[in-house]
Image (spheres, rainbow, N blue to C red):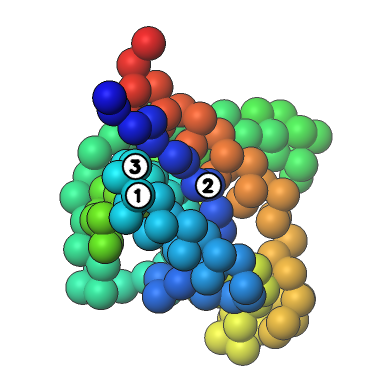
Amino acid sequence: MTVPSVWHVTREYAGIAEAGGVKDVVRGLAEAHARAGSEPVVVLPLYGFIRPETLPSEPVLGFSVSLPDHDRGSEFFEEPVRVRQARLRGVRLLLVDSPRFAALRDVYTYTAEDERENHWKKKGTGHWDSHQVNLLLQRAATMAIPRFFPP
């Protein structure tokens, strides 16, 4: 009998992208699923602060995601996405690589460096496009699932 996969779609993962307590919960659950014989998959953004040498990965998918652009009256635009795969302690990590994620220096808030570059991005305040960040992650995950598990 094959144990079905468990998918976690998250903005945080302990040791990779840390902000609050969610990182520990997601990693703990994913690793527990792996120990129980399941094949857990964690989908998370490949943020700009994640260094390739700390988390070696390989490209596995490429597509574009249609998103509303609230700066253009909610017209839709295509955001290019690459999905990279890594394995860590029995967990398959799918890292969603896009220009939007690559530009982020912190999971949820602006950094001092962001503020130095753009005075309206105040350190510690939330990303102005957080809803698009979440939507991009969710859409990328739903597009990746059938490519790994076709009907």
Circle 3 residue: 38
Q: Earlier in the sequence, mark 2 or mark 3?
A: 2
Q: Amino acid at mark 1?
A: Ala
In the figure, residue 80 lies in which quadrant?
A: top left
Give the quarter of the figure containing the N terminus: top left
Name the front one of labels 1 and 3. 1
- Quadrant assignment, res 39: top left
Where residue 19 appears, as percent x and y from the top left, is: 59, 75
Q: Left or right of 90: which side holds 46?
A: right
Q: Is 61 situated above or below 100?
A: above
Circle 2: residue type: Val
Image quadrant holding the C terminus, namely top left
For the residues labelled 2 and 3, say whether their Cβ atoms are less than 8 Å apart: no
Q: Is residue 119 among the parts visible in the rendering?
A: no
Is 23 placed left or right of 4 in the picture? right
Q: Position of residue 64 (x, y in %)?
A: 44, 31
- The residues tagged by marks 1 and 3 sit, at their Cα atoms, a distance apart of 6 Å
Dot placed on the residue nearer the N-terminal end, 1 or 2 = 2
Residue at the (52%, 71%) spot, across then down:
24
Q: Secondary structure at mark 1?
A: loop
Work out how far the residue at label 1 is from the one at label 2, CA to CA, in angstroms. 20 Å
Viewer-closest of 17 and 29: 29
Q: Are marks 1 and 3 in contact (CB under 8 Å)?
A: yes
What secondary structure is found at the residue carrying circle 2?
strand
Q: Secondary structure at mark 3?
A: loop
* Residue placed under numbered mark 1 in the picture: 36
Residue 105 coordinates in the image, percent (x, y): 51, 74
Separation of residues labelled 2 and 3 (CA atoms): 16 Å
The one of 1 and 23 positioned closer to us in this rendering: 1
Question: Cβ–Cβ below 8 Å for labels 1 and 2?
Answer: no
Q: Residues within 10 Å of mark 1 (few under 14, many from 20)?
A: few
> Residue 9 has which mark?
2
